[in-house]
Image (cartoon, rainbow, N blue to C red):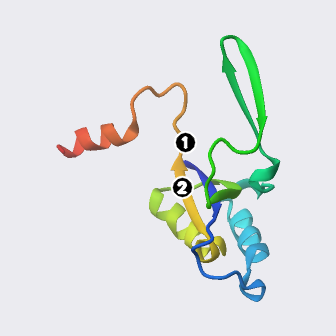
Amino acid sequence: MQFMMFVVHDPGAEPYVPEQDNIAEWVAGTTASGTRITGDRLRPPAYATTVRVRGGKVLASDGPFAEAKEWIAGFDLLDCASLDEAVAIAARHPMARFGSIELRPFWPLDVEEDPRRRNERESGA
């Protein structure tokens, strides 16, 4: 299963402690194990450009779509055997402590059904 892992800046999290930032170790370990396909940091929201098409016109505006205290600071693409494995990998990322991590499974374009609905149906829920 592939997961997009959003690394989220969260001002309400523990204060950042550079000495506890083990990102190089995390990247090396997950890349070596084959569970991390790619990833990188993202510049802060002030660098964002929001693109919309309205009435056939392309509208590009500076800044993020919505004002928020939390913002996506980076991403990693994971290839894991299960959600449990992805959670374990995300929990070792330093931003799980200094921010938060959001995991989202890929939903391929050729798959119409939401996998959660299929799981509910199969379990009788």
Task: Write the residue at 68% across / 65% down.
Answer: 33
Label 1 near label 2: C-beta < 8 Å? no
At horizontal 51% and vertical 56% (from top left) the residue drawn is 81
Q: With respect to residue 123, does 27 lie above or below?
A: below
Q: Is residue 76 above or below residue 91?
A: above
Secondary structure, mark 2, is strand
Rendering coords of residue 121 (x, y %): 24, 38
Q: Residues within 10 Å of mark 2 (few under 14, many from 20)?
A: some
| Residue 69 image point, x, y percent | 62, 61
User: Does residue 36 appear in this view?
Assistant: no
Direction from residue 11 to residue 123 in the image, left or right:
left
Height in image: 44 above or below 121? Answer: below
**Dot 1 crowding, Cα within 10 Å, few <14, some 14–19, many 20+:** few
Disc marking residue 15: none
Q: Residue at x 82, y 49 (%)?
A: 47
Q: Quadrant of the C terminus?
A: top left
Q: Position of residue 34 (x, y in %)?
A: 68, 59
Q: What is the quadrant of residue 64 in the picture?
A: top right
Which amino acid is tagged 1?
Answer: Phe
* Front: mark 2 or 1: 2
Q: Which residue is mark 2?
A: 103
Element under disc 1? loop
Q: Name the residue beneath numbered marker 1.
A: 106
In the image, what residue type sits under mark 2? Answer: Leu
Q: Quadrant of residue 124?
A: top left
